[in-house]
Amino acid sequence: MHGTHSHEAPHAHAGAGVGTAEAAGRARVLGASIAITLGFAAVEAVGGWWAGSLALIGDAGHMLTDSAALLLSFLAARLAQRPPSPQMSYGWRRAEVMAALANAALMLGIVAALVLAAVERIGAPRQVEGGTVMVIAGIGLLVNLGVLWQLRGAHSRALNVRGALLHVIGDLLGSVAALVSGLVIVLTGWTLIDPLLTLFITALILFSALRLLRDVLRVLMEATPAGVDMEAIQQGLLGVQGIEAVHDLHVWTLAGDRLLLSAHLGVRDDREWPEVLVAAQRLLRDRFGIGHATLQPESPAYLHAAARLRGEVLDDHCH
């Protein structure tokens, strides 16, 4: 996975499952969310066209793209259920990360389109049926709250679900903007509120999309996950009886919701390794929430043999 080890030795694995049950749960919730979101997108599109509301039309277009985004997330969650194979030793969990990346890019496109439409509407205000906007936006708000409630319970730490959540939150904010816009228009007749609120909501969506994009890129670059204290992990392992050194320590994640670790552990004696391994695995699982650890022992005898091997290789190269 890393390509940073300069030698090979048997590895000890802990918690090698890739979370297919979690992915199945995500797929079920995403499937229901797709049906709800797609159905109401049609309602908003017709209502926004009839009422002349950019906020409603923009939110309908947003919900339509949300349906595509949720479908993408659904397919990725289904792929993530596939078991590991010789060709895909970690399984298909990264498919969910790629779906999150696509969702973030899609959101950036939506933001650009809404900004252009809002600027155009500011330059040429149009009549808006405030009452109709309020009714449809109010229903949309309830629909989005229901979808949001489902997704927040569906392993929302996973980047794939976070990408879907981002779209739904954008929809919810769009419904709030349309509701406020309709109320202001009914009370004051000020139609400029419609594109102005659209610009405000797109700014919020842009901020969330950029955060998701940053987190996706960190996963793809195998950066240390946020909130992981590498120094604390190293000191914790050094506190395990029998471990004298820790190096080549790496922590990463496949899809943002499951930590993986690999490390080389210097031990006093090969005969102590079984007990040391169990203690290290327990520490990583209970204290740091790391259920998949690849730990390689390095005893004095091993280091001596490795040094001798490196010397032989160097001699062969010189000759």
Image: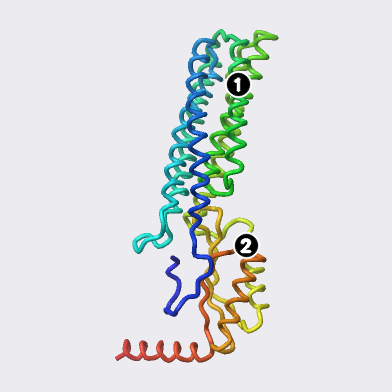
x, y (%) of residue 83?
Answer: 41, 57
Q: Nearer the viewer, residue 120 or 190?
A: 190
Secondary structure beneath disc 2?
Answer: loop
Q: What is the number of the mark on residue 79?
A: none
x, y (%) of residue 227?
Answer: 64, 57
The residue carrying mark 2 is 289
Mark positioned earlier in the residue sequence (2 or 1): 1
x, y (%) of residue 93?
Answer: 45, 53
Cα distance between the residues tagged 2 and 1: 41 Å
Three-letter code, disc 2: Gly
Q: Residue drawn 42% across and 43% down?
A: 75
Q: Nearer the viewer, residue 189 or 174?
A: 174
Protein image colouring: rainbow
Three-letter code, disc 1: Ile
The residue carrying mark 1 is 139
Left or right for 308, reference 263: left
Q: Residues within 10 Å of mark 1 (few under 14, many from 20)?
A: some
Q: Is residue 165 above or below residue 269?
A: above
Q: Is residue 181 above or below residue 216?
A: above
Q: Residue drawn 68% across and 78% down?
A: 239
Q: Residue drawn 55% across and 71% down?
A: 249
